[in-house]
Structure formats: structure tokens, C-alpha cells
Image (cartoon, rainbow, N blue to C red):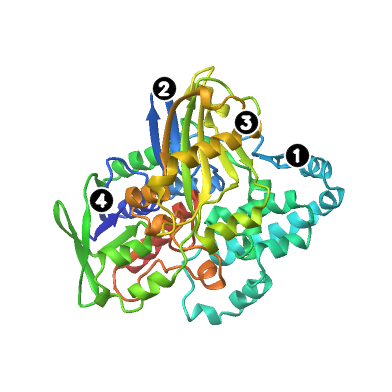
């Protein structure tokens, strides 16, 4: 029986553990926190429940595969429901667009501020669908292409057809002119922690993914996905150990032999790291054992954006909000200049609010609100001291939200919690507090993320948002399935 050690209990690690255990492997999953979930956590403050982390759920089939692959029914563990409207977008000029699967509704809403943009929406969706189809065929459902794969004619043809050196913003300008529309669809770059002015056009595929596939919520909150995966993993015999720190991945003759932890040594034929790949390489593997991933190379990779998070428990309902809400800044481009070029706090940020109590009032009570507030922020550096700035920045964001229609917000706060990029770095081990590992602000980092299989160390694998195929709850879940299948085929 093959011994597998998985470091980290995020969705990628759990997905991988489930598939391998069902195949008959002896799987130990080691998690340093008291609870599983990685960046996806559940926070309870008084009578308020919050999902900390990813909240916009798409590609439900990626989660369903985890269950069907081992002969189970997802419906026995987990319930998804469609969210309507999908996202409510608030613009500085007072315009509001409710993202909808209805093309006619979208055209009508966009035409209120730009008839020209509305007339191009269908053409944009066709291009978005084309890019999504290519992504599914060539990138999302396979491990990172090898050097030999790169000479495959079909793959080369696909690369050429997606115009990899055209930015998302440049692609959008082929269809739209108004800043509202450009910002609304440019925001898809932030789904992978990047800038729409530097990330490639391929990420416009999210418009098709959401517009045709929909956005979903999870009964009981997004953390229910973690709980369902944990339950299934336990049923299949995965040995889950929490509150255990891994100090080193032990390598002998260029092959993993196990991991050293606070609870002793765990022998392993294969080690799967579900965490920030850059942090794992730098902190858990001796540099001599990873000649192709040197500290210098790690330091040269641009991290993704991070986030400033506020959890707000309100003793009132907020009528203008839906489940997902975005309040756009006046100068969207400046926001990403501040984050990636200046590495400074954004003074006029775009604000995202997830309000799961809108769809599930039972989570908060009839007259209360649970708001997960996220602002894009730079990865950690010496340019920002978050301990000095977090309280004043909290008040700045509250004041801005009040000016955008959330009246008397400060007086209605029953509970609040703040998490800065520095906090995220400490809690999750994310390299420089980056939510998505490396950014996708270049051709290399967008299409050739760190591989799922180490080039230097036999038996070492990576799953999660910092490895291929990238970030987002369904994608990291898929990464776990892809790696598990590859390991099964090799043993």
C-alpha cells in the first residue's frame, strides 16, 4: 500500500486525498490549523456567521466530480443553489448593473449608460465562450504542459488563437468604450489576483463561465464544501491530523522519503503540498534539493494581489445589497498601479461585499446582516506597515461605503474583525500574503505556473491556487483531482 502525505487541508488537498484513498492508498493529511479549509474558513462572531475566503462559486461540476469519482452522490453531502442576481455592480456615476444570465437583461442595463457597449455585448460573449472552450480543452483539464507537449501542434495552435500577449483590458476595448463596462468585465483579472491592464485576455472567459453557467451559493455557507469533503475523506479512511506543523520535507537522493513534523516523522512514497508553492519551496525544502527553484528565482516572481478583509455583523438589513456586490472606484486603472507598481494601499479602492444572509436569512436572523468586505491590497512589503494603518483604513472604507448608499453603517456594527495581508501571511503561510500565489500579469506566470510535479524531486507534487491550473475554489479542487489521477496512473 502506497503511503501518501498531504501537507495542508485546503480544497485541493482534500480533493486529492479523497481520490487517492478510494484507490487504496494510505493517506495522511496534515493541517497546521485547528480546522481544515486553507484560505476558506468559517468565522463565528456572536450571532453572526461568515465565510472567510472565496465566496463566488462557479463550475459546480468540479465539486461534483470529487464525489462521483469515488461512487458517491454530491447531493448526499452538499447542496448548491443559484444566486440571483449574480453580482450587483455599483458605479461612481450612479449606474447599477445586476449581472444576469439573460443577454437581453444585460443589454438593457448596459444601454442605460452606453447603447454602443450594449450593442457589442453579444459579440463579446461569443469571444468569451470561444476562449473558455479552448481553456477547457487545453489547460484546465490537464496538468501543466511539459516541454515535449509544447511542440504539440494543437497546443501551439491554441496558444496562438488566444492571443496570449494581448491584455484583458486591450481585448475588452475591442468591444466596449465606457469605463463602467471596461471595469465590470476587467474585474475578472482579480479572480486570479492580477491586473486587467497586464493579465492576458484569456480571463475574459469568466464572462461566459458566469453568464452561461451561473453563480452559486452553498447551503449553510461556503465552508460547507470543506465540511463535506472532510466527511467524505474520513469515510474513505484518510487520517486527518490537525494542529500539526510540518518543519521539513525530507529528500534523499533527489526523492521524497517523508516529512518532519512537530509530531514526529511521517514516511511517504509521495508528498503532496497543498499550500503556497513558493512558501513551501522556500521554507520546507533545502535549496540544494531544488536547483531549478532557487531562492533568487522565488524572489523574482511577482506575487498576486492580497486583500484587506473586514467582517461586519450589522444589527439591521441593508436593502440595496444582494448576495454579491461590487462598488467600483473612480479610477480603476490607478488602483492596480498603486498595488503592483507602487505597492501602496489604495486610497480609493473598489470594494467587494459578500452578503450570504441575503440568500440565506437563517444564517443571520431576520433583522441582521453578515458582510464579508474585501478590498484589493498589495502583497506585503516594507512600504506598508499594516499595524499602523489597519484601523484608519477600516474607517476609510466604512466612510466610503456610507457615501455610496450604505447609510448609518458605523452605528449599526455589532461585531467586526479585520484581516490584513500581513495577517493572511501569518495565518495561511502565503508567500508575502498573496492570495493566489503568483500573479498572472505576464505570459510566463499566467500560462506556466509552478508545475504540479516537481522537476527536481521525485515524488513531490503541488496542488492549490499557486500551482497549475490556478486559483478559485473549483479550479483548486480540480487540481487535486488531476494530481491524484496522475499519481494513480504512475503506481
Q: Mark 3 packing: few (<14 Cα in 10 Å), some, or many (20+)?
A: some
The answer to which of marks 2 and 1 sits earlier in the sequence is: 2
Task: Give me the C-alpha separation between circle 4 and circle 2.
Answer: 31 Å
Report the residue at 34% width, 41% height from top: 230
Q: Are marks 4 and 1 in contact (CB under 8 Å)?
A: no
* Mark 2 lies on residue: 47
Considering the numbered disc 4 on the image, is that residue within a helix, a strand or a loop? strand
Distance from Cα at disc 4 to Cα at disc 1: 48 Å
Residue 401, above or below 461? above
Q: Position of residue 128 (x, y in %)?
A: 70, 58
Asked if the residues shown at circle 4 and circle 3 are in contact, with their CB atoms under 8 angstroms apart, the answer is no
Q: Which residue is mark 1?
A: 95
Residue of label 3 = 321
In this view, which residue lies farthest toward the top? 366
Q: Quadrant of the N terminus?
A: bottom left
Please name the residue that numbered disc 4 is placed on. 30
**Secondary-structure class at tag 2:** loop
**For the point 63% across and 52% down, which residue is it?**
187
Chain-order first, disc 4 or disc 2: 4
Residue 176 position within the rendered picture, expressed as x and y whole percent measured from the top left: 78, 56
* Location of residue 166 (image quadrant): bottom right
Residue 273: give x, y in percent of width and height: 32, 59
Of labels 2 and 3, earlier in sequence is: 2
**Label 4 vs 3, first from the N-terminus:** 4
Residue at horizontal 82%, vertical 44%?
113
In the structure shown, which secondary structural element does the residue marked by tag 1 occupy? loop
Question: Do tag 2 and tag 3 residues touch (Cβ < 8 Å)?
Answer: no
Answer yes or no: do the residues labelled 4 and 2 have beta carbons within 8 Å? no
Quadrant of the drawing holding the C terminus: bottom left
Amino acid at each position: 500500500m502506497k503511503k501518501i502525505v498531504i501537507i495542508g487541508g485546503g480544497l485541493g488537498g482534500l480533493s486529492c486525498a479523497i481520490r487517492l484513498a478510494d484507490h487504496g492508498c494510505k493517506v495522511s493529511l496534515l493541517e497546521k490549523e485547528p480546522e481544515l479549509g486553507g484560505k476558506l474558513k468559517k468565522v463565528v462572531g456572536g450571532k453572526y456567521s461568515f465565510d472567510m475566503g472565496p465566496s463566488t462559486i462557479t463550475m459546480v461540476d468540479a465539486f461534483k466530480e470529487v464525489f462521483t469519482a469515488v461512487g458517491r452522490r454530491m447531493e448526499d453531502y452538499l447542496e448548491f443553489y443559484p444566486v440571483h442576481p449574480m453580482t450587483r455592480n455599483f458605479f461612481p456615476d450612479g449606474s447599477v448593473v445586476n449581472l444576469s444570465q439573460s443577454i437581453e437583461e444585460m443589454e438593457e442595463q448596459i444601454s442605460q449608460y452606453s447603447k454602443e457597449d450594449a450593442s457589442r455585448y453579444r459579440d463579446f460573449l461569443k469571444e468569451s465562450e470561444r476562449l473558455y472552450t479552448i481553456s477547457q480543452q487545453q489547460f484546465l483539464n490537464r496538468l501543466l504542459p511539459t516541454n515535449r507537449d509544447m511542440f504539440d501542434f494543437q497546443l501551439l495552435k491554441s496558444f496562438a488563437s488566444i492571443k496570449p500577449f494581448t491584455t484583458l483590458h486591450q481585448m475588452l476595448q475591442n468591444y466596449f468604450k465606457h469605463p463602467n463596462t471596461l471595469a465590470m468585465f476587467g474585474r475578472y483579472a482579480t479572480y486570479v489576483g492580477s491586473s486587467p491592464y497586464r493579465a492576458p485576455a484569456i480571463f475574459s472567459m469568466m464572462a461566459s463561465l458566469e453568464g452561461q453557467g451561473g453563480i452559486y451559493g452553498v447551503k449553510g455557507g461556503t465552508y460547507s464544501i470543506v465540511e463535506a469533503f472532510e466527511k467524505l475523506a474520513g469515510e474513505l479512511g484518510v487520517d486527518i491530523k490537525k494542529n500539526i506543523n510540518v518543519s521539513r520535507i525530507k529528500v534523499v537522493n533527489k526523492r521524497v522519503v517523508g516529512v518532519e513534523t512537530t509530531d514526529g516523522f511521517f514516511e511517504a512514497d509521495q508528498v503532496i503540498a497543498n499550500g503556497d508553492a513558493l512558501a513551501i519551496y522556500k521554507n520546507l525544502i533545502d535549496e540544494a534539493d531544488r536547483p531549478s527553484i532557487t531562492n533568487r528565482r522565488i524572489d523574482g516572481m511577482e506575487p498576486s494581489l492580497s486583500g484587506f478583509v473586514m467582517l461586519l455583523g450589522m444589527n439591521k438589513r441593508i436593502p440595496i445589497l444582494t448576495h454579491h456586490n461590487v462598488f467600483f472606484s473612480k479610477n480603476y486603472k490607478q488602483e492596480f498601479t498603486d498595488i503592483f507598481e507602487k505597492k501602496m494601499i489604495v486610497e480609493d479602492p473598489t470594494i467587494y461585499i459578500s452578503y450570504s444572509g441575503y440568500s440565506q436569512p437563517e444564517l443571520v436572523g431576520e433583522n441582521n446582516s453578515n458582510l464579508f468586505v474585501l478590498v484589493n491590497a498589495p502583497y506585503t512589503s516594507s512600504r506598508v506597515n499594516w499595524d499602523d494603518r489597519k484601523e484608519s483604513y477600516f474607517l476609510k472604507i466604512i466612510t466610503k461605503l456610507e457615501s455610496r448608499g450604505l447609510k448609518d453603517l458605523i452605528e449599526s456594527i455589532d461585531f467586526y474583525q479585520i484581516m490584513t495581508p500581513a495577517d493572511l501571511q501569518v495565518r495561511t503561510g502565503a508567500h508575502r500574503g498573496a492570495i493566489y500565489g503568483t500573479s498572472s500579469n505576464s505570459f510566463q506566470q499566467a500560462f506556466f505556473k509552478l508545475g504540479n510535479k516537481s522537476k527536481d524531486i521525485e515524488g513531490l507534487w503541488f496542488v492549490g491556487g499557486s500551482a497549475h491550473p490556478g486559483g478559485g475554489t473549483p479550479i483548486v479542487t480540480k487540481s487535486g483531482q488531476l494530481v491524484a489521477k496522475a499519481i494513480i496512473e504512475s503506481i
